[in-house]
Image (cartoon, helix red, strand yellow):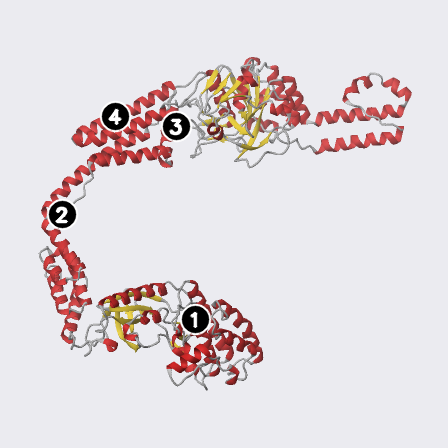
Amino acid sequence: MKKPRVVIPDWLLGGMLTAVILLLFLMQWGPLEGIEARLYDLRARLRPLAGVSQNIAIVEIDDASVAQLGRYPWPRSRIAEALDVISEGGAKVIGLDILYPDPEENQGLEALKAIQQVVQESSVALTGRQVSLPAAAAAETAETPARIAATDPRTSAVQNILQGIDDAVRRLDSDARLSDSMALSETVVLPVYFTIGTPLGRAEGELPEKVLKNFVTQVDNAGDVAGASAILQGIEIKPPIPALVEAAHSLGHINIQPDSDGVLRSHVLLVDYEGQYFPSFAAQIAKAYLNLQPTDIRVRLGGGIELGKIQIPTDPQFKMLVNYSPPSWTAERNPIFPYYSFVDVVNKRVQEEAFRDKIVLLGVTLTGLGEQNVTPRSPRLPAVEVIASVVENILDQNFLLRPAWARSAELALIVLFGAFISFGVPRLSAGKSAAITAFLVLSLAGVAGYLFVNQGVWIQVLYPAATLVLGYTVMVSKRFLITEQEKEVLEVDSIETNKMLGLSFQGQGMLDLAFEKFRKCPVEDVKDLLYNLGLDFERKRMFNKAVAVYEHVAKADPKYKDLTTRMERVRAAGETVIFGPGGGLKRGADATVLMEGGAATTPTLGRYEIIKELGRGAMGIVYLGKDPKINRTVAIKTLRLEDEDMEPAERKALRERFFREAESAGRLSHPNIVTIYDAGEDNDVCYIAMELLDGSDLKDRCQKGNLMAVPAALELVTNVASALDYAHQQGIVHRDIKPANIMILQDGTVKVTDFGIARITASSKTQTGVVMGTPSYMSPEQLMGKKVDGRSDLFSLAVVLYELLTGQKPFEGDSVATLMYKIANEAPPSPTVYNQDLLPEVVRIIERGLEKDAEKRYQRGNEVVEDLRQVIPLVRKDRPAGQSS
C-alpha cells in the first residue's frame, strides 16, 4: 500500500499563483508598489537631458544673499525691490513662491501710526477743527503752504508734522510697498495654501472677490460624483493679505502630495474647495504666460485638464506626473533652469536680457529654511524648481503619461504570462523554460523602458515580471521536489505503511498491535514512536511490556534519552505491583494509584509524580504530587470511574461533566480562589492538579472556645464573598460553601477550594440518596432540587459567618429530614442568643444572608463585601483590637 500523496495539478498551481498576483495588482499592495516606484525612478533618471529653458528663470534667496543682506526673513519692501528690478527687466510673468498670509509685524510703524493719531486729536484742541493730511490731498496742500501759513500758522505747523509722519509711515509700511510694486508690475502670481481634509460643513465667511475669480468655472461631467470625490479636498484656505491679493495678477495653490514613500512624483493641479476647483500655482503661471483667461481652463471630471489648447494628462485626482529633467552627472544643479542670486538681482548685477519675456520664479533655497522635496531626480530639490519643472512640462507639452489602456494591458500581460507558466513551463524542459522566461522578462523591461524614456509612457513592469519569475521558480521547484519525493516513496513505502498502522493502533489503545508494527521498521526511524509507546504502556501500568519496548530501542541506541534509568524504574515497578481484580490496586472508594510494598519507581498520574496520599473524601483521594517538568508541587484530587455499578453511558457522562467543570473552574483567577493548573485522565482515573495550600480549614475555628475575633471573621468572610462574586460573574456556582472548603494559609491568605466539585460528584451514581453539598450549609432552593445560582452560595456563606461568630450552626436537627425542614421553613435563632456582643449591623447582614426567599437575599457577593466593609470599622471601634469574641 503506497503512501497517499496530494499533488496539485500544474494548471491549478499556476492559476492560483496568477490569481494571487492579480489580487496584489488590484489591491496595489504596498511592498510591490514601492519596488515599482523605484523602477519608475530609475527610468526617470535615464531620460535624455533637455536643453536650457528659454522660458523660465529662477531668482533664489540663497545663503549668499543672506550673508550680504542680513538674516532672513527680510522686510517685504526688500522683496518689492527685487520685483521692481525683475519688472524693469521685462519679465512677462513673476511667480512669487513665498506665502504672506499675515501682515508684517513692525513695531516702529505701529508707534508712528499711534503718534499720527495723537497729533490729529491734538490739532482739534489747538485749532478748534480737525486737521489731517489724506493722501489724496497731500499734493494740493503742499502747493499752497504760504497761503495756509498766512491764514493760520498753527494749522500749517500741524499739517507739516502730519506730512512728515505720513511720509515715514509710507516708508516703513513694507506691505504697502510690496503691494505697490506688484500693482505696478501687473504680472505677479501669488501662492495660497489649503488645509487638506474631509470637510464636515461649509467654511465661515466669504472669500474676497479677487480670490473667487481664480476658481475654475468650466467643468465638464459636473454630475460625475465619483470623479468629483477623487479630487484632493481643502477645508481651509490661507490666501495672502488683502492688499497683496488685490495687487496680484492671479492666485494658485502650492499644496503637494508625495507618494507613500515620500517621493514627489506628481503635481496636484486642482484642489476641491466647497465644490469649486482651485488651480495650482504652476498652472496659474502657465495660464498667465499664455495670456489666457480663467475661462480658458476647462476641467473634465475623471481626469484631464485643458489649458487653452494644451491637453494636460492627469489621473482622476488631477495629479500630473512631473517630467523632471534628469541631473547632469557633473553639476549639482539642474542645468536647464538658470539660477540668479537675489542679492545679484537687487544690486543689478544681472544682465538686462536675463528676464525679458520670461517667467521668473522667486523662491527660497536658503539652507534650513527653503523647502526641499525628494524627487526621482534628486533627494533635495528646491520647491521653486519643482514649480519650474511643472510649468516647463505644460508649456513644452513635455508630459509623462499613464495612458488609459495601460492598466488593461498590464492585466492582460499578467493573465498571458500566467497561462504560460500554467501550461507552457510544465511541458518544457527546465532549460528551455528558463530561456523563454528570461527572454520575456527582458523584452518586457526593454519595451517598457523604451516607452518611458523616449515616449514618456509609463507601463508597470513589476507585476507581469513577477508572474513570470515567481511562476517559473515555483513550477521548476515543484517538478524537482516531486521527482525526489517519488524516489523516497519507493524506498520507504513499507516503512511508512507500518508506521501509520502502528500509530493507528496506538491511537485506538491497541498497544500490542502497535508494537508489532513498529518492530517491522528500522529502530532509528521509529525510536521516538517506540519511546512514546513505552510511556503509554507505563500509563496503563503494563510495566513488563514497557520494558520490552525500551529494550528494543536500547538495541539500536542504549543512550537514547533516559532509557537506561527508565528501564530500571519500570522493572522495579513490574516486580512489586500486582494488577487485576485481586491485585495490589484496590477499587471503589479505597482505590489508590500508590503501590503497596513500596516500589522503587514513583507512580504517576498523567505527567505528575505521586509523592504521598494527603486525604480521602467522597469524591476520591487527594495526593501530594509534583510536576517534574517545572518542579512544582501540586495537590491532585482524583475521581475513579471504574465502579461496578455505573453503566458505561453514565461513566461517559460523568467523565464529560468532570472535564467541563474542571475547565470552568480552571478559568478562575482570583487571589482568594485556589488555582487549578491541569485536569486529565489516566487509566480510568480522572484527576485535577491544583495549587498546594499550606494552612488549615475553618472547622476548628467554628468551635466554641476557639472562635476568631469578630473583625477577623468579618474580614475573612469579606474575602470569601469577593471570591464568590468573581466566580459568579464567570458563571460558576460553588454549591458547597462550608468551613471545610475555606482555608487560611500560613501567611493569612484566605482560599476557597473545591469549585465545581459538588456538581461533579452530584452526577455520580455512587452518591444516590445523599443530598450533595453539606445539608447544614445548603440553601432552601438547593435542598428542594431547584436550579441554583450565586445567591445559594451567599446563603451558605451566611451560615458559615453565623457559625464563625457564635460557634453554633443556625439550623440543627436530629435527622437530615428534620434539618432540611428547618432550613426550608423555620427562621434561625438570632446570633445574639449565642453571642450577645454582636452589633445590630452584623446581625442584619447575617439575617439578610439567611433569607429563605432568594429575591430578598443578597443578590451579589459584592453587596456582602460593601456591607461588611462598612461594618468592620464599627466593630473594631466597639471591640478593642485583639479582643476575641
Residue beneath disc 1 = 792
Q: Residue at x 34, y 35 (%)?
A: 24
Is residue 233 placed above or below 344 in the rendered structure? below
- How far separated are the C-alphas under marks 2 and 1? 59 Å
Which of the pair 91/882 is nearer the observer? 882
SS at mark 1? Answer: helix
Labelled pair 1, 3 in contact (Cβ < 8 Å): no
- Tell me how far mark 4 sits from mark 3, CA to CA: 22 Å
- Tell me: 128 left or right of 71: right
Q: Is residue 26 left or right of residue 87?
A: left
Amino acid type, mark 3:
Asp
| Classed neighbour count for the residue bearing mark 1: other residues with Cα under 10 Å, few (<14), some (14–19), many (≥20) | many
Labelled disc at residue 41: 3
Q: Relative to residue 539, is residue 854 drawn left or right?
A: right
Characterize the local packing of mark 2: few (<14), some (14-19) or many (20 or more) Cα atoms within 10 angstroms: some
- Secondary structure found at label 2: loop
Q: Position of residue 157 (x, y in %)?
A: 85, 25
Q: In the image, what residue type sits under mark 2?
A: Lys
The numbered mark, 2 or 1, whose residue comes first in the sequence reads 2
Q: Measured from the top left, where is residue 830 in percent x and y?
A: 51, 81
Q: Nearer the viewer, mark 1 or mark 3?
A: 1
Name the mark on residue 3: 2
Q: Residue furthest right?
A: 151
Judged by depth in the image, the label closer to the viewer, 1 or 4, is 1
How far, Cα to Cα, is label 1 from label 4?
Answer: 79 Å
Task: Tell me what residue is drawn at x 58 percent, y 31 percent.
Answer: 237
Circle 4 residue = 440
N-term mark: 4 or 3: 3
| Quarter occupied by residue 560 | bottom left
Seen from the viewer's position, the closer of residues 27 and 61 is 27
